[in-house]
Each structure stands twice: as structure tokens, then as C-alpha cells.
Amino acid sequence: MIGKYQKLSGSVLKMIAVILMIIDHTAGHILTSSYPVSFSVLGRTVTLYQLLRWAGRLSFPIFAFLITEGFVHTHDRRKYGWNLLVFALISEIPWNLEHTGTLFYNRQNVMFTLLLGFMGLYALEEFADQRTKQAAALLLLFGVSFILKADYGYRGFGLILSLYVLRKNRVLQAIIGICLLTSSWIGGLAFIPINLYNGKRGFIQSSFAKYLMYVIYPVHMLILYYIRLKTIGF
């Protein structure tokens, strides 16, 4: 049952997550922690860099939530999974350039975390009546998430699973989610917009619009790499 305050569609949540992601990456790769602009917040000096990075921490929990919604509502789970894999691979070069200025980086981009989480949801449902296979599949995916060193790693993988399992209990979903975000606890504020979700897809309907959301991820990293290269010299 949708409450009177649940006004945000999946499309609005996706736009919020994308904007916060770009803010976070811009602060992290262009401003850097030494950026001099600061503010006084409740008697404490906080830099612009800190404020923007804090805002960016809300992005991943929203994306993780949207993966669970996509899994539940998509008409073609295999295609959804393949899309995640393709864009995870495409995003590796921009991801590496953004972080090191080279084609090599020992961590992988967040699309791999979302993909592994999606595969975990598939395993939960596919082997629902075969607990041994289910546990083995989840353990394997957990191990891969740990070894792969994708953004947010095994905590991100666990967050996606918990958001799905607890999707009918929003309070417990938020509590467990915040616990899994201990390294970036402020990301727990993401559960405010998540709990304003109305269960509707929203304005992102066409294939073009949906793929544009995927394309934004690698493209914005390339743009940030270029800006950093021209202004800071990396």
C-alpha cells in the first residue's frame, strides 16, 4: 500500500542517484581533499570537498535498491544481467583512467558490484527450493566480490541481497542497510528517498532513455579524466 508521502518514482530515484554519483566523483577527482573552500556547520568546520563526498555516499544505496526493483519487475532478467555485464566491461577503461590516469587499476568499477548483486538475487530465487545449491552459489559470488575488489566490494553485494530479502519490511531493511554501510554510514540517509518510493517506473520508459542511464556512467568518468588531465596534469 502506497503512503501519502511516497511520491518518488523509480525514474526520480535513478536521477537522484546519478546526480549524487557525479557530484561525488567530481569532488573526489577534481576538487581533492585539499580544496580550500569550507563552511561552519553546527560549530564545526566542514570543507566543500567533505560536503560533496558525503552527499555522494547516498548514491550507491539507491542504485543497490534500484537493482532489486529491476530484478523484481524486469520482463527479461537475462537481458538485464547481460546489460550490466556489458557496461561493467565498457566502464573499466574510463574507471581506470579516472583513478590512475592509466589503463590499469587494481580495483573494479561499481557495475561489477551491481552485476554480482543481481546474480545473487537470481541465485536466491532460482535455488529457492535447493538450499545447498543456493548457499554454494551465494558463497561463490561473495568470494568473487571479495577477490574482484569492485567498488563497495562484499559489503555492496551483501547490501543488495539484504534490500531484496527485506523488501517487505522497510524499517528492518533500513536498519540492516545502515549496518552494512558502516564504512560510509552517512549513506544511510539514502533510505529517506528510498522510503519515499511509490513503486512506479516513472518517466524513464523508452529504450533510449534506459540505455542513456547506463552510458552516463562511463562517459562522465571520461569527462572527469579529461578535465583532471588538462587542469591538474593528473
Image (tube, rainbow, N blue to C red):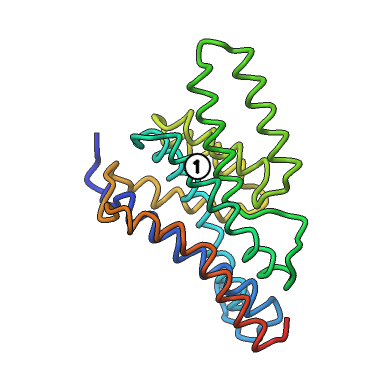
What residue would you read off at disc 1? 82
- Determine the image quadrant of residue 119: top right
Image coordinates for residue 206, horizontal then vertical, percent: 28, 54
Farthest residue, direction bottom: 231
Residue drawn where x is 44% and y is 41% of the image:
80
Q: Quadrant of the C terminus?
A: bottom right
Judge left or right: residue 141 versus residue 5.
right
Q: Looking at the image, which residue is at 60% across and 74% down?
A: 27
Counting from the top left corner in percent of width and height, residue 36 is at 66, 86
* Most foreground residue, 169 or 82: 82
Q: Position of residue 115 (x, y in %)?
A: 56, 42
Q: Inspect this view and state whether residue 45 appears.
A: no
Q: Which amino acid does label 1 sit on?
A: Trp
Left or right of 53: which side holds 143? right
> From what the image shows, is residue 221 above or below residue 200?
below
Residue 38 percent location from the top left of the image = 60, 82
Q: In the rendered view, tell whether residue 165 sits above or below residue 11.
A: above
Q: Which residue is drawn at 53% across and 23% down?
A: 124
Query: How would you rate the neighbour count of disc 1 (Cα within 10 Å): few for under 14, some for 14-19, many for 20 or more?
Result: few
- Is 120 located above or below residue 212 in the figure? above
Q: Which of 131 and 62 is in front in this view?
A: 131
Describe the element under mark 1 as helix, strand or loop.
Answer: helix
The number of numbered badges drawn on the structure is 1
In which quadrant will I find the N terminus?
top left
Note whether residue 112 is visible: yes
Residue at far left of view: 4
